[in-house]
Image (cartoon, rainbow, N blue to C red):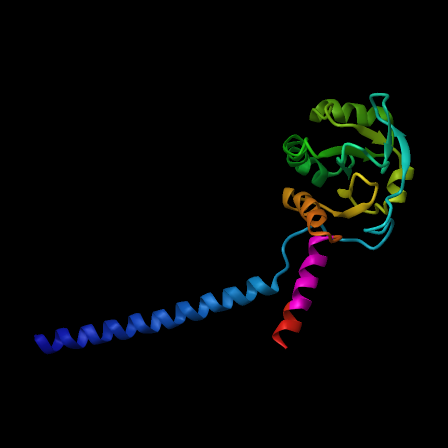
Amino acid sequence: MNEALLISNIVLWVVVAVMGFVILALVRQVGVLVERVAPAGALAVQEGAKVGEAAPRLTVDTLGGKRIEIAAARSDERATLLFFLSPDCPVCDSILPALQSLARHEAERLDVVLASDGARGDHEAFVQQKGLEALPYVLSTELGIAYGVSKLPFAALIDHEGTLRARGLVNSREHLESLLEAMALGVGSIQEWAERETRIQLRTDH
C-alpha cells in the first residue's frame, strides 16, 4: 500500500515537472511572437503628401456654410484629424461611433474634420442619418487628391504648425488612436515605430 502510494506520488511529480517545462516553453514562444508581431496601426500608404512635411493647405467650405483652412498654422496648438469617408462605405459606417467618441474625448487638443466628395444632397442626408452635425463635413475632390486618398476610410493627422504627422487607411478605433500615438512618438505610423525599434534591438543584440 505504502509502495503504491509512493509510486503514484513520484509519477504525479514527474507529470507536474513535465507540465511546468511545457508551460515555460509556451510562455517563451508567446514572448517571441509578441516581439515579432507589429502593433496594430493605421496602414501607411506611399502616395500623396509626405509625413513630416508641410501638409497640403486648402481652403474648403463645410456643408454648414463655414469656410475653414486645412493645414493652416494654429495659435491654439490644436491638431486636425482629417477623416475621409463615403456614405456608401460599410467600413466607414462601422467606425463612425468610434470616431465620434474620439472627437469628444480628444476635444481639448484635436479637431476632427470629415471629408468626402459627390452629390451634396446625399451627404446632407448622411449627416442627418448618422448624427454627424457636430463635426465639420466638407466636400472636396481636391482635398482627397492632395492627401493621396485612394481607398476608404482614410485619415490624416496634421499638427498645429501645419505639418502632416501621420496618415493611413483605418478600419478600427485602434487604428485611429494609432495616428495620435504616432504623432506623440514622432513617427509617421506605428509600423514605422515598430520597424525602428526592431532595428535598434537587432543592433543591440549584435
Query: Where residue 2 appears, x then y in whole percent?
Result: 8, 75
In the displayed orientation, state which residue is furthest to the front: 75
Residue located at (50% from left, 68% from top) = 29
Residue located at (64% from left, 36% from top) = 98
The C terminus: image quadrant = bottom right
Query: Where residue 85 appears, x then y in whole percent?
Result: 77, 37
**Which is nearer the eye, 150 or 57?**
57
Instruction: Confirm whether the magenta stretch covers residue 67.
Output: no
**Which is nearer the eye, 32 or 19?**
32
Instruction: Confirm whether the magenta stretch covers residue 199.
Output: yes
Q: Is residue 107 left or right of residue 157?
A: left
Name the image quarter holding residue 22. Answer: bottom left
Q: How many marks?
A: 0
Q: Is residue 70 left or right of residue 194?
A: right
State the predominant SS element of the stretch in magenta: helix
Q: Which residues are magenta?
A: 189-200
Name the image quarter holding residue 141. Answer: top right
Query: Where residue 117 appears, x then y in whole percent?
Result: 86, 34
Name the image quarter holding residue 19. Answer: bottom left
Residue located at (77% from left, 23% from top) = 125
Vertical side of 184 occupied by 65: above or below: above
Query: Where residue 204 appears, x then y in whole percent?
Result: 63, 72
The N terminus: image quadrant = bottom left
